[in-house]
Amino acid sequence: MSKRERIIIAIMSIVILYGAYSLFFSSSKKNTGFSAEVQMKQLHKLITDVSVGLSKDNLTEIEIYTIARAEAGWEKDPFFMKKDHTAGKMGGEFDYSAPASLGKFNYSGYIEIGGKKMAIINNMEYETGDELEPGLYFIRGIDPAKVVIEIGETQEKIVIPIVEEVL
């Protein structure tokens, strides 16, 4: 064994012996000096001091305005924007007139290998021209941001945007 290894083993032995001594032989009844009653009294004193301090402060006009605006209801959520499925643009409110079948498909991935484009819809891989459900839905276009699905009976086209999961 080298000198370095002997030193490391000696230090580890000292640490283990000290840990065993403090675990088994030192006094197990240590008084921390704080009881639950003392801690509760200190907590009540802190709460009283904070409430008195807050009631003494006068709010400025800006603070009053900020609080009033924060409490007021929003006419329109500024963070909720619809995606215009036809043009791929953002704007306005959500479009509830989309076909009911839109929620039936989940476009979650795009693969392009050697000019061959594939879309992952409902955890299955499809190419342009494939049927999603025999005779009902067909893939007419695949794009990294969206998939165009045609309804067989009416030949109506539905544009499904990609759904990217954020972890």
Image (cartoon, helix red, strand yellow):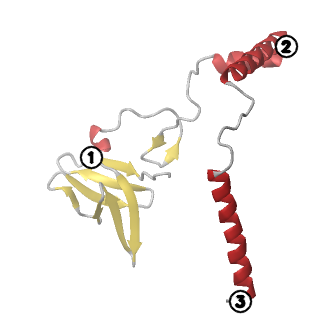
Between the residue at mark 3 and the residue at mark 2, the CA separation in whole angstroms equals 69 Å
**Circle 2: is it few (<14), some (14-19), or many (20+) Cα within 10 Å?**
few
Position of 73 with respect to 156 (left or right) is right
* Secondary element type, mark 3: loop
- Image quadrant where residue 144 sits: bottom left
Residue at 71% in and 82% down? 6
Residues tagged 1 and 2 counted as in contact (Cβ below 8 A): no
Position of 48 with respect to 129 (left or right) is right
* Secondary element type, mark 2: loop
Residue at 85% in and 10% down? 56
Q: Quick one: 28 or 40, which is closer to the camera? A: 28
Residue highlighted by disc 2 = 57
Q: How many marks?
A: 3
In the image, residue 17 lies at what x, y percent? 67, 63
Position of 3 with respect to 150 (left or right) is right
Identify the amino acid type marked 1: Glu
Lower position in the chain sequence, tag 1 or tag 2: 2
Between the residue at mark 3 and the residue at mark 1, the CA separation in whole angstroms equals 81 Å
In the image, residue 141 lies at what x, y percent? 34, 60
Between the residue at mark 1 and the residue at mark 2, the CA separation in whole angstroms equals 64 Å
Residue highlighted by disc 1 = 156
Residue at 26% in and 52% down? 150
Identify the amino acid type marked 2: Asp
In the image, residue 159 lies at what x, y percent? 36, 49
Of circles 3 and 1, the one toward us is 3
In the image, residue 86 lies at what x, y percent? 42, 47
Residue highlighted by disc 3 = 2
Of circles 1 and 2, the one toward us is 2
**Circle 3: is it few (<14), some (14-19), or many (20+) Cα within 10 Å?**
few
